[in-house]
Image (cartoon, helix red, strand yellow):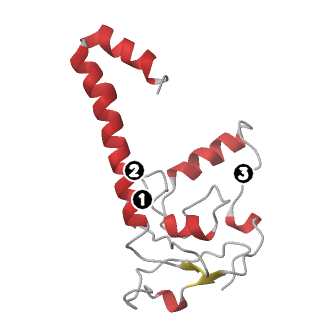
Amino acid sequence: MLAQIPLALLLFALGGFPWVVWGICMRISLSLTGHWIVGYLAHNTGPQTWLVDGAAVQGHNLPGLGLITMGEAWHNNHHAFPESARLGISKGQNDPGWWLLALLSAIKLVWNVQQPGDLPVREELQRVAQHLHPATLQPIPKLATNGVAGLRP
């Protein structure tokens, strides 16, 4: 929270207390609320490509929210490959967080960045049969597997 002080001082100098309220208090409140809502939805609703046998909680993907969540909306993929920096692993799964990490890796500012194909095979990880949503057994919108290395069919 101390990291907010320099910005709060700058906002106060530029516009007084109302700028601090909107630039610090409201920004943090909206960001945290949005994070909690995405977290709730990602653990309770949406399509799944993977199930983790024995896991107390399963993740769900939230198509359409990948861009504004920096890829966190691909939460089923995160539960399947928790050590992976790349969450959008299928065609059409936009993952700006991964794009940024790939850029930082290319210019040598980060290293040892893991992707699903770099990880050992998890015996407890199972692909959902025929791309059916396990709760409703309705077809999941088509997700291309695009041959991610190391993934079991």
Q: Name the residue under label 2.
A: 35
Specify whether residue 89 is in view. no
| Mark 3 to mark 2 CA distance (whole Å) | 24 Å
Going from the N terminus, do you reach mark 3 or mark 2 first? 2
- Residue kind at label 2, given as amino acid type: His
| Mark 3 to mark 1 CA distance (whole Å) | 24 Å
State the quadrant of the C terminus: bottom right
| Total tally of numbered discs in the picture | 3
- Residue 122 occupies quadrant: bottom right
Which residue occupies 45% across, 88% down? 132
Identify which residue, 42 or 56, lies in the foreground.
56
Specify whether residue 57 is in view. yes
Badge 3 vs badge 2, beta-carbon distance below 8 Å: no
| Mark 1 to mark 2 CA distance (whole Å) | 6 Å
Image coordinates of residue 115 in percent, x first then y, are 69, 61
Badge 1 vs badge 2, beta-carbon distance below 8 Å: yes
Identify which residue, 138 or 122, lies in the foreground.
122
- Residue kind at label 3, given as amino acid type: Val
Q: Mark 1 points at which residue?
A: 39
Asked if residue 54 lies left or right of residue 4, the reply is: right
Depth-wise, is mark 3 or mark 1 nearer the camera? 1
Residue 28, placed above or below residue 69: above
Q: Mark 3 points at which residue?
A: 113
Which residue occupies 38% across, 12% down? 9
Which residue occupies 38% across, 62% down? 40
